[in-house]
Amino acid sequence: MGLGAFKTAWQRQTKDFGHDQASKYTSLVFDNRGIGESDKPFSRYSSSEMAKDTVELLDHLGWTGKRQLHVIGISMGGMIAQELALLIPERIASLSLISTAARLVNTVGFMENLRNRINLFIPKSPDVQLAEVKTRLFSPTWLNNPDTEGTFPTNGDRFAAQELKKRQDTEGFTGKGFVLQAIAAGWHHKSAEQLGNLADRVGRERIQVVHGDVDRMITVPHAEVLVREMGGEERGVTRIVIRGRGHVLPMEERKEFMRLVEDMVDKTEKLNQS
């Protein structure tokens, strides 16, 4: 999962895959270091170290088979997923990189980029914080649509309530953990050579890159870099850009996201059998 997010942010997909299709899928979600129920050591965090955390968890569970893992990573989680694929490529059945980047670059102009980075760390009232987070994570259309999962007036209101509840958990959500995760995401860097190596070892036909074209957290040019430097669509990488959607595609496009994951799983399971 992404920066500052609890594992419960996957609750929709946990239901869609792990519960409603329990005979087909076994789902694993977990808190990254620095958040939720995981440890929050005071040290330099990196996406590579967080990938090693993931390998240790997978090994503990005994999930060590060849082409066994369908890995889905969003935002910072997608950065960790890249590192994971470099560590254990032979265990990856499919790799879905959602709303993420090989490295963060300035695509919006110097001043706006600087302002966005500074705003992450400036103390603000909860109302101001939530308003800024919502506009960076979600498309305006989705935020203003009626809440179809409960009784809140809009999707934006539901997200705000969930975010407030998360921030009231002073043991699970800490300033220290958030900043250390932000350092990991900000300093994540995969070169074109590393991405080419990743694609060679995992298999380009097993990789999909999915992004919303109004993502204000990690802009869509980052997805184009990922696709291009892993070899491009012409060599088998799947590229999907969802029009009018923002950063958190598993929430904004729950049904479509489910279909994309199912299609990739079905495709790569057939590759495993060939």
Image (tube, rainbow, N blue to C red):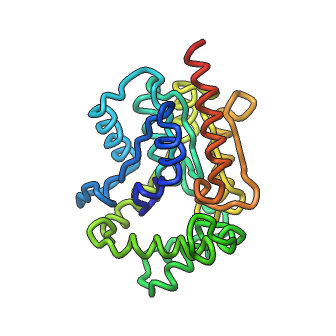
Q: Which residue is drawn at 68% across and 48% down?
A: 256
Q: In this view, does 23 lie above or below 29?
A: above
Q: Position of residue 158 (x, y in %)?
A: 54, 72
Q: Give the image location of residue 67, x and y in percent.
A: 48, 23
236 or 165: nearer the viewer: 165
Image quadrant for the C terminus?
top right
Q: Is residue 221 left or right of residue 88?
A: right
Q: Residue at x 52, y 31 (%)?
A: 198
Q: Is residue 11 above or below residue 207?
A: below
| x, y percent for residue 180 | 34, 62
Residue beneath the point at 76% across and 56% down:
243
Which one is in front, 264 or 11?
11
Q: Quadrant of residue 191?
A: top right
- Tag count: 0
**Residue 115 visible in the snapshot:** no
Q: Is 58 or 219 nearer to us in this picture? A: 58
Q: In percent of the image, x 68 and y 54: which residue is there?
A: 221
- Point out the residue furthest to the top here: 274
In the picture, measured across the screen, residue 140 lies left or right of residue 119, that is right
Q: Relative to 2, say whether 193 is above or below.
A: above
The spot of residue 48 in percent (x, y) is 38, 44
Q: Is residue 168 visible?
A: yes
Above or below for 166 versus 223:
below
